Amino acid sequence: MAMYRYRITPRSGFATPLRSDTLYGHLLWAAAMLEGETRVKALIESFADGVPPFVLSSALPAGRLPMPPLPGIKRARFKDQFAGKGNLLEQLQRYKAFRKNGYWPVQLWHSLKGNISQEALFNVWLAGESSRAKPGQKNDPPDEKTMAYQPHASIDRRSGTVLDQGGLFFSKGIWYRPGTDLDLYVQAEDLDVFETLFRHIEAVGYGADRSVGMGQFSFTRDESFDATPFHAEGSHKLTLSVCFSEELAGYEGYWIPMVKHGRAWNGFGERNPFKKPFFAFAEGSLFSGMPDSGYLLRNIHSDPRIVQVGWPLTIPVTLEEYYAD
């Protein structure tokens, strides 16, 4: 499938993170709303049969990729590689700060031609740190988003109304700084199919609390995007999506585990919003082996029509030095 990149511009806060599995669900509901139940069933069966109509990443900070979970540098090797570049304790403190980074630049992936190691990524990060700030002086860029809690009225699930005795609960929301953009990578056979569904989400909003103005965004296709390097070969696959499947035996590599507690949309009158929790791999997981299919979960909700799509979009990387073993 051809690969594309879209630039998403947030226009409001988001009560639901822009992650791939939730985006899949929104696109399927958009198909149901626009074209009916027959159409959405056909799309679901395409995913089940291993021929997805489109494959999505999560929305990532513009120009960046999720940091792969490579194992740490052994103490003796770290001392050999980095002690000569400054005070060893200070270098270890810098390495600790480096390990907290959730993303790395797409341009770095290009310049390294997908060949990565923990030492290479840390060396590039050290060079950037030395150019941005003097020793002992912190000069970090401002955070691109802010997390805050929002109050909500507690709902009686039997009646669908606010509890008689009242009560509040709080959930996290995300607000992006003005000027912040996100990248969404998409593989699609028929781009018109994807864009028609995605425009519907743009029009009605994404995630929870759309009725009060959350989840608003605009998007454009990045016409300058060159997908050629993304189709190269590598020793591993770096997933840009939330990934899960029926069987876990086929996964090999380094991964970031998570448990998803999904919610179902109530647009068709469904009173029970809760899906069964399931195990998943977060964006940035690094696989040398993955299942060929099975990236669709059924029977995760009391309504058998509701499914969860975890088809991953990956890019190639090759592990160098002792990580290659």
Image (cartoon, rainbow, N blue to C red):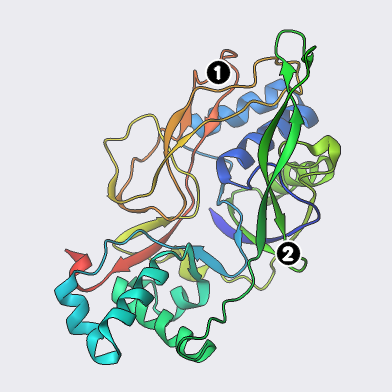
Would residue 226 be found to the left or right of residue 116 on screen?
right
Secondary structure of the residue carrying tag 2 is loop
Residue 274 at what x, y percent from top left?
59, 22
The answer to whether one can see residue 49 in this image is no
Q: Which residue is mark 2?
A: 177
Q: Is residue 9 above or below residue 39?
A: below
**176 or 55, nearer to the observer:** 176
Dot 2 or dot 1: first in sequence order is 2
Q: Residues within 10 Å of mark 1 (few under 14, many from 20)?
A: some
**Quarter of the C terminus within the rendering:** bottom left
Name the amino acid, label 1.
His
**Residue situated furthest top in the rendering:** 158
Q: Residue at x 74, y 36 (%)?
A: 151
* Label 2 – label 1 distance at C-alpha: 36 Å
Name the amino acid, label 2.
Arg
**92 or 215, nearer to the observer:** 92
Secondary structure of the residue carrying tag 1 is loop
How many numbered circles are shown?
A: 2
Residue 188 at what x, y percent from top left?
59, 50
Q: Residue at x 63, y 48 (%)?
A: 18
Q: Which residue is mark 1?
A: 301
